[in-house]
Image (cartoon, rainbow, N blue to C red):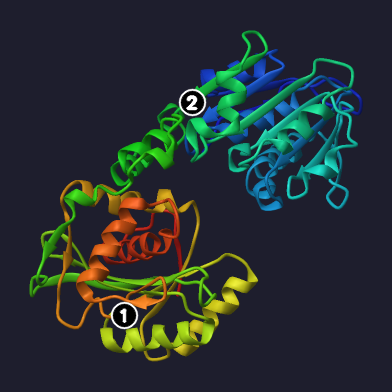
C-alpha cells in the first residue's frame, strides 16, 4: 500500500497536468516543493524514497529534459522505474517509452533519459534541466557524481535530487561531504525521513526490523542516520559465551553455507552449524572454513553434510539470476539424499548480520566445544586446532565487516534464520 495518486486535470498531448496525492508524508511534500539546486532525500528502508523521486520527476516543468540514474540497471528496474512507470501508465501521461534507447516521453513534452551508472562516462554528452539519482549511496566514489552534475546545464530551474538510504560508510561517504560538510545554505538541502514515518508500511514492519537489527544498523537502516559501519563493532564478542556441549534437547539445527569458488589466496567458503535450544538460546557448534577451488569446495560440502547426518538441513546462499539457479541445481544434485534448501540473497551482509548480532549482544549465543567439531577450519592456508579455530572465529566476528571476515557472518546468519524459521530478506527456493 502507498499514497494514492490521482490526475486531477486531463492530459492531452502537450498539455499541463496536475497531480493530487493523498496520504503523502510531510518530507515528500517538502521534496516536491523545494527549489534547491541540490537536494538529498535521505530515508530509511521503505520510507517512501522512490515515490518521492518518481513524483518529483513527473512534476518537473513541462517541456524540460531530465535524467534518471541508478548504480545498476537492476537498481533502475527495482527502484526508480519500478515505481515511476506504473504510476505514469496508470495516469495516462506516457506518450512514448523506448526501453532500448532509454528514453521516456510524457504528454506534457518532457523528455527523460534513463541510464545506469555501470559506465558513468557514457552520460557525459547529455544536457538536461534536472537529474534524479536513486540509491547513489551505493556508489563509493564521487567521480560519477561529478560527471552527472555537469549534465544539468539546460535552460530552466536546474535541480539535482538524490534519494538513498544512508551508505555503510556513513560520514566517510562523499554524499555526507557534499551535502553536509560542504553544503551551502540555500543551495544544498537535506530532507530525512525514517521508516516509522511512512504510515503505509504494515503495522509491525518497523518494529519487527528494529527488534532483529543491531542498534547501530537500526539507526542507519530505519532512522536514516549517518552511521559509519567501519567504526561500529557489529558483534559484541565479549558477550559470546562458551559451553562444552549444547543441551540434549534442541529445538532445531541447520548448517548454513556461504560459498566462494577461488582456491589458494581467494575468497573463503564457510559453513556454520547452529542449533537453538528449547529456551531459545543459540549455539554455534561448528564452522568449516577454507579457500577452496570448486572441486574441493563441493567435496567439503558433501563430507560436512555426511558428518552432520541426514536429518540436519543444509542451507545454501544462492545468487539471483540464471547463473545462481544453475549453481543451485548443481549443489542439489551433489547433495542428493540430504535436505537441501537454496536461499536467495538480498540486502547487504551487515544488514543480514543484524539478528545474530542482536542475540549475541543479549548474551543469548554460545560457542560449543564438542569433540569432533571445529576440526576443518582453515586460516591463511593452515588448518587450525579446534581451540585456535574458535579463537580465530571470535576474532573475525570482532573485525566484521572489515577484511575477509564476511563469509562466516553470512553462513551464521543463514543458519540462524533457518533454525528460527524466519525470513528477513532471504527468499527460500526448495
> What residue is at 68 percent from the left and 32 percent from the top?
54
The tally of labels here is: 2
Sequence-wise, the earlier of marks 1 and 2 is 2
Where does the image place residue 9, in percent across and percent down from the top left?
Answer: 77, 21
Q: Nearer the viewer, residue 395 or 335?
A: 395
Where does the image place residue 381, in percent across and percent down from the top left?
Answer: 41, 76
> What residue is at 39 percent from the left and 87 percent from the top?
302
Residue 206 showing in the rendered view: no
The CA distance from mark 1 to mark 2 is 47 Å
Against 22, residue 304 (above or below) is: below
- Choose top left, top right, bottom left or bottom right for residue 416: bottom left
348 left or right, relative to 110: left
Q: Which of the image's four quarters has the C terminus?
A: bottom left
Where does the image place residue 228, in percent across and percent down from the top left?
Answer: 44, 36
Q: Nearer the viewer, residue 86 or 314?
A: 314
245 left or right, relative to 427: left
Reading the image, the residue beneath label 2 is 193
Against 333, residue 151 (above or below) is: above
Where does the image place residue 255, in percent across and percent down from the top left?
Answer: 32, 74
Q: Residues within 10 Å of mark 1 (few under 14, many from 20)?
A: many
90 left or right, relative to 64: left
Reading the image, the residue beneath label 1 is 376
Amino acid at each position: 500500500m502507498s499514497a494514492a495518486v490521482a490526475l486531477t486535470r486531463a492530459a492531452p498531448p502537450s498539455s499541463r497536468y496536475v497531480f493530487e496525492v493523498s496520504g503523502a508524508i510531510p518530507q515528500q511534500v517538502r521534496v516536491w516543493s523545494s527549489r534547491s539546486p541540490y537536494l538529498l532525500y535521505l530515508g530509511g528502508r521503505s520510507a517512501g524514497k522512490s515515490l518521492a523521486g518518481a513524483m518529483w520527476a513527473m512534476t518537473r516543468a513541462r517541456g524540460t529534459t531530465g535524467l534518471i540514474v541508478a548504480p545498476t540497471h537492476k537498481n533502475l528496474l527495482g527502484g526508480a522505474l519500478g515505481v515511476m512507470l506504473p504510476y505514469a501508465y496508470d495516469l495516462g501521461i506516457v506518450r512514448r517509452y523506448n526501453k532500448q534507447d532509454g528514453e521516456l516521453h510524457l504528454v506534457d513534452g518532457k523528455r527523460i533519459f534513463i541510464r545506469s551508472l555501470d559506465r558513468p562516462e557514457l552520460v557525459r554528452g547529455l544536457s538536461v534541466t534536472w537529474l534524479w539519482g536513486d540509491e547513489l549511496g551505493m556508489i563509493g566514489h564521487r567521480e560519477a557524481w561529478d560527471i552527472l552534475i555537469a549534465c544539468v546545464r539546460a535552460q530552466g530551474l536546474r535541480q539535482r535530487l538524490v534519494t538513498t538510504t544512508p551508505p555503510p560508510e556513513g560520514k566517510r561517504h562523499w554524499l555526507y561531504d557534499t551535502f553536509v560538510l560542504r553544503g551551502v545554505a540555500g543551495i544544498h538541502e537535506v530532507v530525512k525521513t525514517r521508516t516509522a514515518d511512512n504510515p503505509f508500511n504494515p503495522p509491525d514492519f518497523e518494529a519487527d526490523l528494529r527488534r532483529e537489527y543491531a542498534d547501530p544498523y537500526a539507526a542507519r537502516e530505519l532512522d536514516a542516520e549517518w552511521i559509519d559501519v567501519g567504526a561500529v563493532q557489529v558483534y559484541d564478542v565479549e558477550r559470546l559465551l562458551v559451553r562444552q556441549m549444547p543441551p540434549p534437547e534442541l529445538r532445531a539445527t541447520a548448517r548454513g553455507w556461504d560459498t566462494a569458488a577461488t582456491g589458494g589466496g581467494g575468497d573463503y567458503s564457510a559453513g556454520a552449524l547452529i542449533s537453538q535450544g528449547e529456551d531459545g538460546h543459540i549455539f554455534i557448534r561448528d564452522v568449516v572454513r577454507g579457500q577452496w577451488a570448486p572441486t574441493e569446495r563441493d567435496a567439503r560440502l558433501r563430507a560436512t553434510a555426511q558428518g552432520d547426518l541426514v536429518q540436519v538441513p543444509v542451507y545454501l546462499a544462492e545468487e539471483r539470476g540464471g547463473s545462481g539457479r544453475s549453481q543451485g541445481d548443481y549443489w542439489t544434485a551433489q547433495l542428493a539424499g540430504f535436505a537441501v534448501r537454496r536461499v536467495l540473497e538480498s540486502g547487504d551482509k551487515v544488514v543480514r548480520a543484524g539478528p545474530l548480532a542482536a542475540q549475541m549482544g543479549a548474551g543469548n549465543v554460545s560457542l560449543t566445544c564438542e569433540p569432533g567439531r571445529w576440526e576443518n577450519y582453515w586460516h591463511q592456508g593452515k588448518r587450525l586446532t579446534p581451540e585456535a579455530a574458535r579463537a580465530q572465529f571470535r576474532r573475525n566476528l570482532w573485525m566484521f565487516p572489515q577484511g575477509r571476515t564476511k563469509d562466516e557472518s553470512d553462513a551464521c546468519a543463514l543458519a540462524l534464520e533457518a533454525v528460527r524459521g524466519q525470513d528477513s530478506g532471504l527468499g527460500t527456493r526448495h
